[in-house]
Image (spheres, coloured by chain):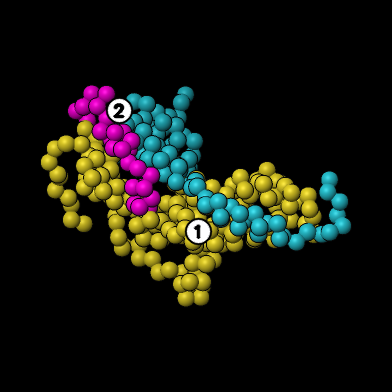
Chain colours: A yellow, B cyan
């Protein structure tokens, strides 16, 4: 069925309204403004071509994000040697045990002393962006889809074609790596409160 | 009689990420964690911290777009082919 002018009259402003969200997600996935813009443009074009398959127009938002994510994953797969997934070493990188809360929490403080909340309040958007962008690709994509985009584990598993257990594992490791990066940045920037520097674990 | 059981801090923390993500399987496990958090100040503080962290990460899902890029998308959409004779409803 061909799309008509009314379809476009509805579609165009809806997409314009979603642009900051589509671009924000694309930016975290690609880590690059130019690539993010190209990804969004690609997703918008694909969405128009496939608009007939959207059964309920009030689900446009979720549908657009699925198209965006799939477009990103397709381009990533193409870039990694014609359909071969990026090799992922489950043993590599960060373990899942690092906890920013453990580093910051002071149980002996009374309720009004809350260094972990103070730390979060001091973090800038740029700090979070830098920490996410520095994650290994396989962790980063899962963290972006779950924590930034709000996808379910099942949705991520389907998009990445991996078991849900692997989503859980990558998410745990990604979050741990993210928290370690934020801790190290916060410590160096003096956001962790007074007192001497703690000796860091070496792993 | 309630099926709720008292979970330990260790168990609650093992389930915490999935609980906060809304991914815990089984309503009773969900309730067990909730009950534990209501009783344990230390685990509650941790859960509160992780929840706040998630909220902050969620804000990254939105970024300002350059006006030039918005214009590029508008131009792209204006060129989408439509069937010419279909009346708009």
Magenta stretch mostly in which secondary structure?
A: helix
Q: Identify the residue shown where x is 87% and y is 57%.
A: B85
Task: Compare residues A119 and A179 and report the one nearer the observer.
Answer: A119
Left or right of A72 on screen, residue A113: left
Residue beneath label 1, please?
A: A36
- Is the same chain shared between marks 2 and 1? no
Q: Which residues are magenta?
A: A107-132
Rendered location of residue A68, percent (x, y): 56, 57
Q: Identify the residue shown where x is 54% and y is 62%.
A: A38
Distance of mark 2 from mark 1, alpha carbons?
42 Å
Residue beneath label 2, please?
A: B41
Rendered location of residue A183, percent (x, y): 26, 46
Q: Identify the residue shown where x is 71% and y is 60%.
A: B79
Rendered location of residue A67, percent (x, y): 59, 57
Chain holding disc 2? B
Figure quadrant of the C terminus of chain A = bottom left
Q: Is residue B49 magenta?
A: no
- Dot 2: within a 10 Å radius of its alpha carbon, few (fewer than 14), some, or many (20 or more) residues? few
Chain holding disc 1? A
Left or right of A77 on screen, residue B10: left
Q: Secondary structure at mark 1?
A: helix
């Amino acid at each position: 069925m061909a799309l008509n002018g009314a379809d476009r009259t509805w579609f165009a402003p809806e997409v314009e309204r979603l642009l900051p969200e589509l671009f924000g997600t694309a930016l975290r996935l690609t880590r690059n403004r130019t690539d993010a813009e190209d990804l969004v443009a690609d997703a918008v074009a694909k969405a128009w071509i496939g608009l007939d398959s959207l059964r309920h127009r009030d689900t446009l938002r979720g549908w657009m994000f699925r198209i965006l994510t799939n477009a990103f994953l397709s381009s990533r797969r193409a870039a990694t040697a014609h359909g071969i997934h990026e090799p992922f070493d489950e043993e590599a990188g960060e373990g899942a045990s690092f906890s920013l809360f453990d580093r910051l929490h002071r149980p002996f403080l009374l309720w009004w002393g809350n260094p972990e909340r103070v730390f979060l309040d001091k973090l800038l958007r740029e700090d979070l962006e830098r920490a996410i962008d520095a994650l290994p690709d396989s962790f980063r994509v899962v963290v972006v889809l779950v924590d930034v985009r709000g996808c379910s584990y099942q949705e991520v598993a389907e998009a990445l074609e991996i078991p849900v257990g692997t989503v859980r594992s990558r998410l745990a490791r990604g979050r741990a790596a993210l928290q370690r990066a934020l801790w190290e940045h916060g410590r160096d920037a003096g956001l962790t409160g007074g007192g001497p520097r703690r000796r860091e674990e070496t792993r | 009689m309630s099926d709720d059981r008292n979970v330990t801090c260790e168990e609650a923390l093992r389930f915490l990420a999935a609980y906060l993500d809304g991914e815990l399987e089984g309503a009773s496990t969900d309730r067990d964690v909730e009950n534990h958090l209501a009783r344990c100040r230390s685990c509650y503080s941790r859960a509160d911290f992780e929840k706040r962290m998630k909220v902050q990460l969620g804000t990254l899902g939105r970024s300002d777009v350059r006006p030039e890029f918005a214009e590029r998308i508008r131009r792209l959409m204006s060129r989408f082919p439509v069937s010419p004779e279909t009346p708009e409803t």
